[in-house]
């Protein structure tokens, strides 16, 4: 190959590389945006942990690394009997609500998906439309209802609004769409009743969706603040977010204790998320494809 | 085993009638195949027999008992679906045993029955596997096993081979036929593949647009098609059709040849199967030029342009005519099929 032969080749190579520049720039911008987003997400958590390791006199100091790190706040919070009860309350509420939502959401989703009956679409739209009503609008009727039924300051009172969710119904309905009718019909011919078909055939086929829904519902109830704050009166019935917000008094909010409690309370959610994250990701992908 | 009878079976979706009064009796132990193009109503009929579709009119009897309003589980049937419908979260053993779930049989007997069925289907070594770890043919066997395990009165197969490759399809065809010979159950099999229908059936039901076109043995529907639709649908390649005029003296073909065979007068359609149409040395029914040849090994299909249109004929595989060559095509008079051109019905 002569030098003359080489030149055009080199030029061609340069030409092909030239258009890559904007793509690289685009990648750089994307990475910067993601990095910025990552920092924004991580910073509150970093400050939460940082504050939980600070003495009260250092709380309003914005430095991320405490000057004199201490575990005193953790010892104080863990030795405080109230925190234990709030933790148990939150665990009871989040667990029972999750089990209930998984059961009822999937049952309703399955019914709306696999049975044809008059008004099916109307029922589905009615359920979906409740997603548009903000919680702030619902708390007053919920409160009046709780008051008239004697549910104030009880577990039932805290849990009842979340025992079935419109989002869960929607999610499960979408997933049941992916279960071929042949499975259902085969089971019907094999002699199962409709409840057995739902439980033994359809439910195992939508496990990823159930795992995803379990995480959504558990996290939602674990971190719920407004309704538990309104419906509970006694300190013993508080859930973690409500109890933590009450640390300190009007004159002096004990941020270091609040942040310590918050840091501890993230542990169960992290555990739940780490266990089920592969399901949640797969679940979201599948829902996206189906939807 | 059971006898199945359909009396004036009708299916409507809203105001649209898709099955227009099906009458059929399937005798005890018979292997009957419903065949027809997509949308002809064969799967709908099967689903109505299974109880998966409501009946708009008529009556279905299984062993003399009217089952119109019975749930599928009460009809003593088993069904094999097109996409197998074996449960992916269960092992082969559990899938086969699933059919016995609602049976009152003792547990030990259920386990024994599952083993017997697995043995019959040569699936014993795969009993603990999940469906994902099985091939298409093995999955199909599991689906058949789940149907077999209950020893139902009636087996229903809804295009069970259409997801398999050609080789496996041939193999499974044979296995289902063997299953029928050993078990002797009444089988209703739906397919759109006429080769499947011809090779497996005791009798074939050919359907079109919600009507039965003809019911008969494979030989019968092949040799004596009731109308032009059946004549074209059964047999591959399709029957050659020639528009001709029947007169008192015979049928005059395009190109001038005439045949003495005529039971009618007026416009007719003459049907000749490619198997029966062969190139000959002297004059024949038609003369034309070879446009395409398709060597099949022992025989060669030749596509011949004639005054009556393109004809397909079979020639020797060793010395077939060449493309562009002029050939004379002839057939035995006994092998000609005559249809009324207006109604399409066979004239015998």
Image: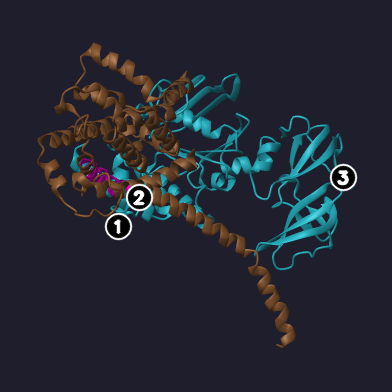
Chain colours: A brown, B cyan
Residue nearer the viewer, A95 or A120:
A95
Q: Which residue is mark 1?
A: B125
Please name which of the two marks, 2 or 3, marks the residue nearer to the observer.
2
Residue B337, position as x, y percentages in the image: 73, 41
Q: Position of residue A60 (x, y in %)?
A: 27, 44
Residue B178 on the magenta span: no
Between B143 and A77, which is closer to the camera in this rendering?
A77
| Residue picked out by circle 2 | A42
Q: What is the distance, in whole Å, between disc 1 and disc 3 at their CAs? A: 63 Å
Q: Chain of mark 3?
A: B
Q: Position of residue B107 (x, y in %)?
A: 19, 40
Alpha-carbon neighbours of circle 3 within 10 Å: few (<14), some, or many (≥20)? Answer: some
Mark 1 near mark 3, Cβ–Cβ under 8 Å? Answer: no
Q: CA distance from mark 1 to mark 2?
A: 53 Å
Q: Count residues near mark 1 (Cα–Cα under 10 Å), then give few for <14, some for 14-19, many for 20+.
A: few
A239, above or below B126, in the image: above
Q: Which chain letter matches label 2?
A: A
| SS label for mark 2 | helix
Observer-nearest residue: A264 or A100? A264
Camera-side mark, 1 or 3: 1
Question: Pointer 3: what residue?
Answer: B254
Q: In this view of the protein, can residue B182 be seen by the observer?
A: no
Residue A273 lies within the magenta run: yes
- Do the dots labelled 1 and 2 sit on one chain? no
User: How many labels, in total?
Assistant: 3
Answer left or right for A93 relative to B250. Answer: left
Q: Which residues are magenta?
A: A261-277
């Amino acid at each position: 190959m002569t030098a003359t032969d080489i030149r055009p080749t080199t030029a061609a190579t340069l030409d092909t590389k030239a258009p890559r520049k904007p793509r690289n720039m685009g990648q750089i911008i994307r990475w910067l945006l993601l990095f910025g987003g990552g920092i924004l997400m991580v910073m509150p958590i970093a400050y939460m942990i940082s504050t939980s390791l600070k003495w009260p006199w250092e709380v309003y100091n914005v430095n991320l690394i405490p000057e004199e790190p201490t575990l005193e706040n953790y010892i104080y919070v863990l030795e405080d009997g109230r925190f234990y009860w709030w933790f148990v309350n939150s665990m009871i509420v989040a667990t029972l609500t999750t089990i209930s939502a998984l059961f009822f959401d999937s049952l309703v989703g399955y019914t709306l998906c696999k049975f044809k009956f008059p008004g099916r679409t109307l029922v589905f739209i009615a359920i979906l439309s409740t997603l548009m009503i903000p919680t702030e609008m619902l708390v007053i009727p919920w409160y009046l209802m709780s008051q008239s039924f004697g549910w104030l300051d009880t577990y039932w009172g805290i849990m009842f609004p979340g025992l079935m969710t419109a989002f869960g119904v929607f999610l499960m309905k979408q997933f049941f769409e992916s279960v071929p009718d042949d499975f259902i019909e085969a089971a019907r011919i094999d002699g199962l009743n409709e409840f057995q078909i739902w439980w033994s055939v359809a439910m195992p086929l939508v496990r990823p969706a159930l795992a995803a829904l379990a995480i959504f519902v558990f996290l939602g109830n674990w971190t719920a603040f407004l309704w538990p704050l309104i419906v509970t009166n006694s300190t013993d019935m508080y859930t973690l977010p409500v109890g933590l917000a009450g640390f300190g008094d009007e004159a002096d909010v004990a941020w270091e204790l609040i942040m310590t409690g918050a840091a501890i309370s993230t542990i169960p959610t992290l555990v739940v998320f780490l266990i089920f994250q592969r399901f949640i990701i797969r679940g979201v992908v599948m829902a996206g494809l189906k939807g | 085993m059971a006898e199945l009878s359909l009396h004036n079976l009708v299916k409507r979706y809203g105001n649209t009638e898709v099955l227009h009064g099906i009458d059929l009796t399937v005798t005890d132990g018979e292997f009957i195949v419903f065949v027809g193009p997509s949308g002809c109503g064969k799967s709908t009929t099967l689903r109505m027999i299974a109880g998966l579709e409501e009946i708009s009119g008529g009556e279905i009897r299984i062993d003399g008992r009217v089952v119109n309003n019975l749930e599928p589980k009460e009809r003593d049937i088993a069904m094999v679906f097109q996409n197998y419908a074996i449960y992916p979260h269960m092992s082969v053993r559990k899938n086969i045993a699933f059919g016995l779930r609602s049976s009152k049989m003792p547990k030990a007997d259920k386990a024994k029955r599952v083993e017997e069925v697995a043995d019959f289907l040569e699936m014993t070594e795969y009993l603990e596997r999940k469906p994902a770890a099985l091939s298409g043919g093995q999955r199909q066997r599991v689906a058949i096993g789940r149907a077999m395990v209950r020893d139902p009165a009636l087996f229903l197969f809804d295009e069970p081979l259409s997801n398999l490759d050609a080789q496996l399809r041939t193999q499974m065809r044979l296995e289902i036929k063997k299953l029928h010979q050993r078990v002797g159950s009444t089988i209703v099999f739906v397919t759109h593949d006429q080769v499947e229908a011809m090779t497996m059936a005791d009798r074939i039901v050919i359907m079109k647009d919600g009507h039965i076109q003809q019911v008969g043995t494979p030989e019968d529907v092949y040799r004596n098609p009731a109308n032009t639709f059946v004549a074209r649908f059964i047999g591959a390649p399709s029957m050659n059709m020639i528009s001709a005029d029947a007169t008192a003296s015979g049928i005059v073909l395009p190109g001038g040849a005439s045949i003495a065979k005529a039971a009618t007068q007026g416009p007719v359609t003459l049907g000749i199967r490619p198997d029966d149409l062969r190139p000959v040395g002297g004059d024949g029914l038609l003369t034309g030029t070879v446009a395409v040849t398709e060597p099949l090994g022992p025989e060669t299909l030749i596509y011949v342009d004639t005054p009556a249109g393109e004809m397909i004929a079979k020639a020797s595989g060793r010395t077939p005519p060449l493309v562009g060559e002029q050939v004379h095509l002839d057939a035995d008079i006994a092998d000609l099929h005559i249809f009324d051109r207006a109604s399409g019905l066979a004239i015998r």
